[in-house]
Image (tube, rainbow, N blue to C red):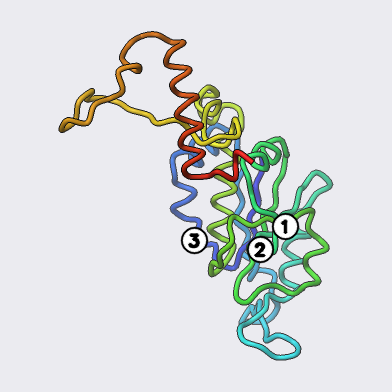
Amino acid sequence: MKISILTICPEQFGDFQKSPLIARAVTAGRLELSIIDIRDYAPGSFRRVDDSPYGGGAGMILRCQPVLDALHAVRTPESRVIILTPAGKPYTQADAHRLSEESHLILICGHYEGMDARIYPYADELLSIGDYILTGGELPAMVITDSVMRLVKGSIKEESTKEESFEQGLLEYPQYTRPADYNGQKVPEVLLSGDHEAIRKWRQEEALRITKENRPDLLD
């Protein structure tokens, strides 16, 4: 898979590229990650990528020309272009699965007060990672890249993704490890029983309980 991220803050991705999942995927040839600096496509010695909004208002707006020139430089017929914006569709695990099947993702990071509206028609879709505002789209780009790459075959053990939260429409059941008794807090006896069917039923019941308590909307 190839992922190209268009940003005015490429320095934010330094440590992200060194994170275990991403670094292993790149080393193994499962991921080609490109961080494209939009400023490289801005004219003039100051490489200005923003300007004040027509009609007045607070903040600065990303200009069409540098963003679209950067996009045209990396886009191919196989690319799927995504703009990260609060106006986008809420991102879900189903989207992560869908995008993991793509050969080339282009993620455009918004910034400042937003971007020129004439950029949006060049995207295949708009995505948001939540109903809140961030300084820019760089963190959402990392979130989407991480969530997509862990679903690409070979990135992590396939069985590790089967019973996670949201995979079956529920939150995941509680997990425990050693010691079996920590300051009087004991691991449920059923998990120590060796009875796989009883464990399966307990996990299903706990997944339902936790989902009902924390995310009842998922049960709807």
Q: Kindly report which numbered mark, 1 or 3, lies closer to the viewer in this rendering.
A: 1
The residue sitting at 62% across, 86% down in the picture is 58
Disc number at residue 12?
Answer: 3
Q: What separation in Å lies between label 2 and label 3 (alpha carbons)? A: 18 Å
Q: Residue furthest left?
A: 183
Q: Are marks 1 and 3 in contact (CB under 8 Å)?
A: no
The type of residue carrying mark 1 is: Leu
Disc number at residue 126?
Answer: 1
85 or 131, which is in the foreground?
131
Disc number at residue 85?
Answer: 2
79 or 170, which is in the foreground?
170
Left/right placement of residue 19 relative to residue 75 reads: left
163 or 18, which is in the foreground?
163
* Spot occupied by residue 87 in the image (x, y as percentages of width and height): 69, 64
Q: Are marks 1 and 2 in contact (CB under 8 Å)?
A: yes
Neighbours of disc 2 within 10 Å: few (<14), some (14-19), many (20+): many
In the picture, residue 60 is in which quadrant?
bottom right
Is residue 132 shown above or below 19? below
Q: What separation in Å lies between label 1 and label 2 (alpha carbons)? A: 7 Å
* Spot occupied by residue 148 in the image (x, y as percentages of width and height): 60, 40
Q: Residue furthest bottom?
A: 56
What is the quadrant of the N terminus in the image? top right
What is the quadrant of the C terminus in the image? top right
In the picture, residue 199 is in which quadrant?
top left
Is residue 56 shown above or below 69? below
